[in-house]
């Protein structure tokens, strides 16, 4: 394998890689933030699928399309951990990716209908254009990375063919074909993109910046939380404002703030520090910042949908969909926090896991509670977890200070 990498000598003559040290090695650039704007729109499109139609098929469509959106974004984040976005060629790449991402976003509401082909082709074009560009960007400066992206391109091509085939099959079969494509996408990183003739990528070549990955994923969660605020504000502003809708509006806002506190108060910082110092940090980053964050994103998106439904009728009967979304989204977000903390070397967060169970248990009370009451009870569970988490962290800090001595 080493000999094969050494002979890999095609590619751009200019150095397009980030500096190995200094602030530029991990700093999030303006073009990366500009690129994120497309995914603000994409998350909005995904969440509105379930707001407009509450059904089992709509939920599955939301999850599949949401994961596809995340996959496009996170692959770009990995690539930009090595590529230097301050160079003209990489900036041009980001702008091309934005165009494809915008086309994907436009197609999302009808991705399982009339715009299936637009969705599939645009997504595959985004994935392949980025990975093929990376091959040429790394070829001269980092041959091992170039070979990694050859493997990734092969996996993108195989999965992409299935995505595009799915666009041509009848609507009722498309779900199953795209599920297969999604499985191929998900399996690739875990088997280190094993490819016939090339084998699997070596873990030591995935030397990403933990600080950059942590900050980029945190910004995506901010995007998702921002979508929650957009749904809350637009739904509240479009309806009749009364005491009940005002209470639902405040409840939705409080829920968003509590979700922000649960991750950003302690988890985000501990994740960055652990990965930066971990042995085999590429695999750790893959778990903590590639697979686990989608749980956060789904928790936030489903909570935003639930908030929108509560605002539409805060004092009516609580149907199964609204109750399931309210309690399930909170439980999923709490579990994501616990799993993330464990993935970055911390202990299991027992309070979060217990909180998830309590949140789910509230579902059985939906027949005797209004949507407004249930939403505030869910918020109460989140608040208790936040308080207990903060108390535990302060106690640990006090013990650490005492052990350090004068």
Image: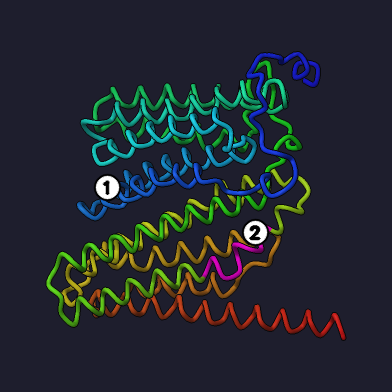
The reply to whether discs 2 and 1 touch (Cβ–Cβ < 8 Å) is no
Camera-nearest residue between 238 and 331: 238
Question: Is 251 left, or right, of 75 in this rendering?
Answer: left
Q: Residue 31's spot in the image, x, y percent?
A: 49, 42
Q: Secondary structure at mark 2?
A: helix
Image coordinates for residue 320, horizontal then vertical, percent: 25, 65
What's drawn in magenta, residue-wise?
Answer: 262-272
**Which residue, given by chain and number where applicable, does mark 2 sit on?**
271
- Seen as rendered, the residue at the extreme left is 240
The image position of residue 153, as x and y in percent, is 55, 24
- Which residue is at a point 41% across and 80% down the rendered structure image? 380
Mark seen at residue 19: none
Residue 304: quarter of image: bottom left
- Asked whether, in this view, residue 164 is left or right of residue 136, the answer is left
Occupied quadrant, residue 349? bottom right
Residue 109: horizontal and vertical position, in percent?
25, 41
Depicted 250 relative to depicted 160: above or below: below
Q: Residues within 10 Å of mark 2 (few under 14, many from 20)?
A: many
Q: Quadrant of the N terminus?
A: top right
What is the magenta segment's predominant secondary structure? helix
The residue mark sitting in front, 2 or 1, is 2
Residue visible at 25% across and 31% down in the picture: 115
Quadrant holding the C terminus: bottom right
How many residues crowd mark 1 within 10 Å: few (<14), some (14–19), many (20+)? Answer: some
Q: Earlier in the sequence, mark 2 or mark 1?
A: 1
Where, by quadrant of the figure, is residue 255 drawn?
A: bottom left
Q: Which residue is mark 1?
A: 58
Question: Residue drawn at (61%, 36%), measured in percent from left and top?
Answer: 84
């Amino acid at each position: 394998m080493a000999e094969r990498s050494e002979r890999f000598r095609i590619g751009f003559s200019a150095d397009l890689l980030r500096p190995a040290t200094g602030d530029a090695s991990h700093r999030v650039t303006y073009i990366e933030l500009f690129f994120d704007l497309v995914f603000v729109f994409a998350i909005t499109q995904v969440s509105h699928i379930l707001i407009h139609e509450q059904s089992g098929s709509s939920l599955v469509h939301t999850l599949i399309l949401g994961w596809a959106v995340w996959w496009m974004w996170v692959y770009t984040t990995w690539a930009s951990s090595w590529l230097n976005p301050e160079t003209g060629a990489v900036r041009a790449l980001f702008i091309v990716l934005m165009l494809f991402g915008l086309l994907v976003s436009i197609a999302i509401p009808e991705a399982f209908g009339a715009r299936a082909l637009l969705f599939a082709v645009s997504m595959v074009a985004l994935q392949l254009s980025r990975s093929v560009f990376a091959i040429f960007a790394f070829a001269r400066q980092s041959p091992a990375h170039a070979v990694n992206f050859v493997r990734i391109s092969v996996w993108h091509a195989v999965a992409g063919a299935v995505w595009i085939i799915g666009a041509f099959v009848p609507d009722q079969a498309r779900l199953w074909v795209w599920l297969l494509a999604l499985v191929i996408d998900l399996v690739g990183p875990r088997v280190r993109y094993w490819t016939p003739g090339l084998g699997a990528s070596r873990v030591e070549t995935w030397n990403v910046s933990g600080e950059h990955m942590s900050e980029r994923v945190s910004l995506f969660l901010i995007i998702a939380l921002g979508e929650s605020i957009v749904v809350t504000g637009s739904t509240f502003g479009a309806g009749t404002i009364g005491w009940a809708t005002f209470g639902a509006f405040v409840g939705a806002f409080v829920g968003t703030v509590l979700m922000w506190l649960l991750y950003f108060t302690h988890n985000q910082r501990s994740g960055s520090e652990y990965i930066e110092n971990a042995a085999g940090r590429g695999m750790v980053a893959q778990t903590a910042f590639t697979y686990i964050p989608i749980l956060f994103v789904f928790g936030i998106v489903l909570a935003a949908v639930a908030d929108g439904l509560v605002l539409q009728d805060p004092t009516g009967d609580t149907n199964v969909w609204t109750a399931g979304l309210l309690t399930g989204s909170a439980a999923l977000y709490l579990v994501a926090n616990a799993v993330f903390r464990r993935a970055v070397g911390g202990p299991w967060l027992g309070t979060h896991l217990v909180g998830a169970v309590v949140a789910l248990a509230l579902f059985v009370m939906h027949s005797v509670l209004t949507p407004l009451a249930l939403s505030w009870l869910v918020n109460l569970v989140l608040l208790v977890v936040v308080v207990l988490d903060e108390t535990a962290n302060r106690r640990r800090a006090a013990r650490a200070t005492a052990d350090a001595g004068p």
